[in-house]
Amino acid sequence: MSDFEKKITEFKSKIKSSTKIEEIDSLRSDIFGKNGIINLEFKKLGALSPEEKKSFAANINKIKQELLNIYKFKSDEILNKDIIEKVEKEKIDITLPEKDFIIGKVHPVSQVIDEISCIFSEIGFSVEEGPDVENEYNNFTALNTPENHPAKDMHDTFYLDKDMKTLLRTHTSPVQVRTMLKGKPPFKIIAPGRTYRSDSDQTHTPMFHQLEGLHIDKNINMGHLKGCLNYFIKEFFEVEKIKMRFRPSHFPFTEPSAEVDIGYRLENNKIIIGEGDKWLEILGCGMVHPNVLKNCKVDPKKFQGFAFGIGIDRLAMLKYGINDLRSFFECDYRWLNHYGFDPLDVPTNYRGLSR
Ligand code: DAH
């Protein structure tokens, strides 16, 4: 028996008797690693004649395959055993007495995020996420926000370092940047999430929620934006018709930019959406500025599109008749019990969003 064959027999029996994944992992590098026995054996090929090489290499490959199979079999066996043990250990006793059990409720903000995601997914938007802790570039510079823009002022932004390079994102727009930088156009995404600004009164909290939308393709224009928002608002408020108006506005990252108001009237202090002559601002939007596309490695000569940013908390307040934004974040169980949603009643397009 050659030295190689002896080692192989030895490894086979070692693998078979192993009981821990770490043990067979270290055996794996001894066998298949760069300086493992298989590679060392392959190195002998150089000294052989062409005919000898063929059968010699075929033999090593056969042994290699056999060892791989043994290794795979053993590692599956160990992993399965680990999983079974874990499942056994983590078994939940579902026979707990029911009488002390308090049913939790889904927070209106989570509910509204689910509803909005549901509406946009129906027309081909997928959901993206970004981190709450952002860098200055994604939050401002890449979005074409000039150095002296008021939003960059210390007053609004929570900076996390002296150099003002890391911050709590002030809007969900940096997810546009992240999405474009990591992929190739077309893009059709929404991005819900937490946002932060140093502001607090009845209509502002230091942490609030936004939802970003971005649709970039070859021929996307403001008509698409209008159609998309019109559809969204109708679906969201579950009404047949709505009144919507675009007011010219300014955002550094869009050109042209607009703010969107929806028409409503009050009846016994209740807001009725879609009728009346009062207007309520609900979102900002526009055509993505060519500079933003360039900063995100998208060619503005070939691609264009729209973006929008919606205040989620505001929509939740409107739809569910909640009048103080601060109550959202007070964690008062009585409040949540009243305004919250049944966890089993997940919003779907076919069953209805909020019923
Ligand atoms: N990021 C803006 C804000 O927080 C909202 C916004 C406006 C987002 C226009 C957009 C947009 O994507 O196109 O105030």
Image (cartoon, helix red, strand yellow):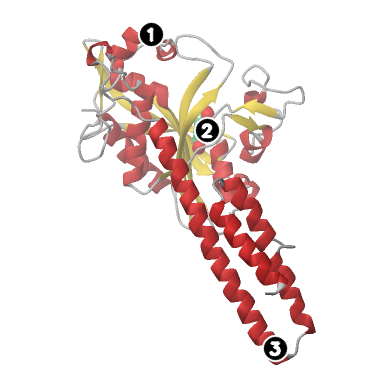
Mark seen at residue 172 = 2
Front position among marks 3 and 1: 3
Asked if residue 339 is positioned above or below residue 70 in the image, the reply reads above
- Asked whether the viewer can see residue 216, the reply is no
> 195 or 93: which is nearer to us?
93
Q: Is mark 2 within 8 Å of ligand 1?
A: yes
The C terminus sits in image quarter: top left
- Point out residue 37 in the picture as x, y percentages from the top left corner: 70, 66
Mark 3, residue position: 52
Q: Is residue 211 visible?
A: yes
The tag earlier along the polypeptide, 3 or 1, is 3
Amino acid type, callout 2: Thr
Residue occupying the far right of the picture: 47
Q: Amino acid at mark 1?
A: Asp
Element under disc 1: loop
How far is mark 1 from mark 2, CA to CA?
A: 27 Å
Crowding around mark 2 (Cα neighbors within 10 Å: few <14, some 14 to 19, many 20+) is many
Task: Name the residue beneath numbered marker 1.
Answer: 332
Q: Position of residue 237 (x, y in %)?
A: 27, 29
Q: Residues within 10 Å of mark 1 (few under 14, many from 20)?
A: few
